[in-house]
Image (cartoon, coloured by chain):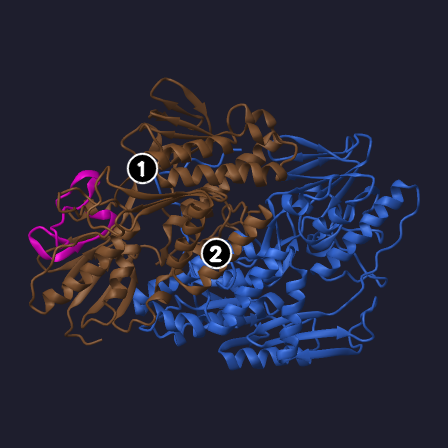
Chain colours: A brown, B blue
């Protein structure tokens, strides 16, 4: 709309990038949103796709549909491969450049392997829909294989090792035992499903490290009650196709390792050649611009925005979304000739689900707060109340009425029947014959 | 359940195989259901997955879930690779044999390429969930590519050629124009989506050949009104990566060819070395046993059951399901020492949908009939009434309350909003790094 409007190019359509685009919808700018995939993904529920509770379309929405009512915004499905700072142009994988006036880097994060041998080759990550569907298929295949050859249970064919005791690891471990004991035990009556282990390995002394220790201990006890083997204070030394080796020499036979031990900034951060902090995150000033480049901004997991004490904010969706709204305001101030203001995250607490009628929720007190400190007072909830809070919050933050309705129905169905409708093994296409490679 | 019970092995968990297994649930036999995939697929709605209306889990159900209340039935996810008739054992891809007392072959059908050059390499089939998801991804990628480079529209990058004017071809063509004009035109405002053609090629003189000519003509007019180019009396001479060549020398530039021109019996029919009729279908006696092998039965698309005049029944779900129930009865008669009775298909009519509030339904008169003849009287419906009949019938024949509810909600949502929630591009998994190959 108007070739003379400044062009804001946003790379990444995750929580940060998409929120920024929507926040600029009425601003006097042209917005171009760029992402490798064609959909916005609600990553907090990805583990439910991997464990057959939800289908991909329940937690993902086509970006083009979301921005349909933003007349100043367009979308490009592209992979950014570089940048020419002098001419203000992004380079892309298909050779076309994207010129910008203001650049917003919101590329998110990838799984961090920390260079541990075998992780890159043998572990599963959980960052994309494809990852989730692939993990689901792999896991169900292991059960089918063990059903044909029960001796495979001995070598851990149907066991899963989840590495990392943060929210993703806890949620995944909890969902896996429910899937194993509530669904697969009935699906495979001839198989001793109880011998398929779910092991959760965490290097620290407690689960859910950012939470109050009391909630981490609660999660540990509850997971153990439900059948998860929780190993604390143990790091992974190596992953192979057949087992996980721990730093104390112990090995756990398994063919399925979910790596949820941490993230690092997306590869985009390396491609751009900007200054990086810990975990590859881009260094940003307190107004979210990149040092020395006032027309380049970075938000979300890829950026190392810090609080007033210089501590980086956590890599979670609320930080990305608040930063996106702050950024949208600052870009408009900058274009209007005003000075920019620093970004301060408003902490509204955190939550993680453990399984059926079990979750933990921690709110800062006073609520909300701009300056959470370790050891300060918190309001803590667990059990059914925390679980209902978790359900409600995730439902209302999902994008789109249709997805909310579909997720609500699937959850109700799964709760009442203990069923998991999406336990489908999808392999490679089979039909006429070989498939033409994607051409674009 | 009793090692001394005769063992009925059913190969294939489609409409025929699954119905047979359920019909034998209370019989004094042990039932083993074998399928390559782990799910029963409701193929009549596969085109709606390919066109982003429904998700895979809406039209597929894990076989193990369906047979959970059949205590005499077990499931094996295996590919059958051969048979030893003398010792009554099936060979499977993983090396384990499956012994049987009675064998039911219900392997379904694959796409028939008729040896036309390029079809096997370049055309898409639509027989599995993977095919549908793959076609959906391919098609959306073509639109993304054309959005980046509008000149690709000239070479038909976003055009689709559907080959075959039967129910699948008509339904697919109708769904594609709705997707293009109702959804993608809004998703890609900068693209001249009207230039993305949907071409339906049929070698015969009318669409929907098994229907009364009046309904085929109705479908042709309606599809043309909605934007489909219908070419009758034209066969495909060759398919390449860039175009379709017709037998009159004309070429249609396209990167997406859906091959719905016919089916042939699944490869299983070749593997077993039994006598085959047209289209590779297994010859069966009128009680559905294979000639000379009274303990081997074949039903559904893989079998050439014929009517009293020796004409093979059509390869449609109702024939397979009725044959399955007949077979279950005959197996019990045989085991009880009684003689078997011939199978006669009870024709209850046929229907095909064209799109929004448009379908055709044809009922035999008198209804139902065991002996439909070309030219006999029929009751014919079209328009909204036929469409509602189609919706209702497909809903009630879907397996499982959850899938019925989910499909109903998706249909209601799609109808009211003209949205297609499942328009997701899913590529290969990307996360940690390379993925371990599936091991089983």
Q: Report whether A123 appears left or right of B287.
A: left
- Subunit of mark 1? A
For residue B174, which quarter of the picture? bottom right
Is residue A291 one of those drawn in magenta?
Answer: yes
Using the image as rendered, state which of residue A199 and residue A352 is in the foreground.
A352
Q: Report whether A76 appears left or right of A47.
A: left
Is residue A163 one of those drawn in magenta?
Answer: no
Q: Using the rendered image, report if marks 1 and 2 lie on a common chain.
A: yes
Residue B426 in the image, given as x and y percentages of width and height: 42, 53
Please report whichever mark, 1 or 2, sits nearer to the chain's N-terminal start.
Answer: 1
Residue B210 in the image, given as x and y percentages of width and height: 70, 71
Residue at figure coordinates x 40%, y 76% from the top left: B194
Q: Which mark is residue B403?
A: none
Q: Report whether B231 appears left or right of B271.
A: left
Q: Secondary structure at mark 2?
A: helix
Q: Which residue is mark 2?
A: A407
- Subunit of mark 2? A
Q: Report whether B374 appears left or right of B160.
A: right
Q: Which residue is mark 1?
A: A212
Q: Nearer the viewer, mark 1 or mark 2?
A: 1
* Crowd tier of the residue under label 2, counting other residues whose Cα lies within 10 Å: few below 14, some 14–19, many 20 or above: many
Q: Does residue B143 appear in the picture of this structure?
A: yes
For residue B89, which quarter of the picture? top right
Residue at figure coordinates x 19%, y 63% from the top left: A328
Q: CA distance from mark 1 to mark 2?
A: 30 Å
Magenta region, residue range = A274-303
Quarter of the rendering occupied by the N terminus of chain B? top right
Q: Does residue A164 appear in the picture of this structure?
A: no
* Crowd tier of the residue under label 1, counting other residues whose Cα lies within 10 Å: few below 14, some 14–19, many 20 or above: many
Using the image as rendered, state which of residue B89 and residue A82 is in the foreground.
A82
């Amino acid at each position: 709309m108007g070739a003379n409007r400044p062009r804001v190019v946003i790379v990444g359509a995750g929580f940060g990038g998409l929120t920024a685009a929507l926040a600029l919808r009425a601003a006097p700018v042209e917005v171009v949103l760029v992402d490798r995939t064609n959909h916005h993904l609600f990553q907090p529920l990805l583990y439910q796709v991997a464990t057959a509770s939800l289908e991909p379309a329940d937690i993902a929405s086509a970006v083009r549909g979301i921005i349909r009512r933003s007349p100043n915004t367009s979308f490009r499905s592209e992979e950014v491969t570089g940048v020419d700072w002098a001419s203000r142009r992004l380079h892309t994988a298909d050779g076309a450049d994207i010129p910008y006036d203001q650049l917003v880097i919101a590329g998110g994060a990838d799984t961090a392997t920390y260079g541990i041998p075998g992780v890159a080759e043998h572990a599963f990550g959980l960052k994309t829909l494809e990852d989730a569907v692939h993990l689901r298929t792999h896991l169900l295949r292991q059960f089918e294989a063990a059903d044909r050859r029960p001796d495979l249970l001995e070598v851990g064919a149907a066991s899963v090792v989840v590495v990392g005791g943060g929210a993703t690891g806890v949620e995944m471990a909890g969902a896996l035992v429910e899937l194993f004991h509530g669904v697969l035990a009935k699906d495979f009556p001839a198989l001793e499903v109880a011998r398929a282990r779910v092991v959760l390995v965490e290097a620290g002394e407690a689960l859910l490290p950012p939470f109050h220790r009391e909630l981490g201990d609660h999660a540990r006890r509850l997971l153990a009650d439900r059948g998860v083997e929780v190993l604390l204070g143990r790091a992974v030394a190596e992953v192979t196709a057949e087992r996980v080796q721990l730093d104390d020499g112990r090995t756990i036979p398994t063919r399925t390792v979910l790596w949820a031990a941490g993230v690092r900034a997306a590869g985009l951060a390396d491609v751009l050649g900007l200054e990086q902090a810990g975990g590859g995150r881009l260094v940003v000033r307190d107004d979210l611009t990149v040092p020395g480049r006032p027309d380049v901004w970075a938000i979300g997991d890829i950026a190392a925005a810090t609080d007033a004490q210089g501590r980086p904010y956590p890599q979670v969706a609320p930080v990305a979304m608040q930063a996106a709204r702050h950024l949208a305001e600052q870009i408009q101030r900058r274009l209007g000739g005003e000075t920019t203001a620093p970004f301060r995250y408003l902490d509204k607490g955190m939550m993680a689900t453990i399984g059926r009628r079990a979750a933990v929720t921690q709110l800062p007190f006073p609520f909300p707060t701009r300056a959470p400190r370790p050891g300060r007072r918190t309001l803590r909830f667990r059990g059914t109340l925390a679980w209902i809070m978790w359900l409600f919050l995730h439902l209302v933050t999902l994008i789109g009425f249709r997805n909310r309705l579909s997720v609500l129905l699937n959850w109700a169905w799964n709760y009442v029947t203990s069923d998991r409708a999406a336990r489908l093994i999808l392999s490679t296409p089979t039909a006429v014959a070989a498939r033409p490679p994607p051409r674009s």
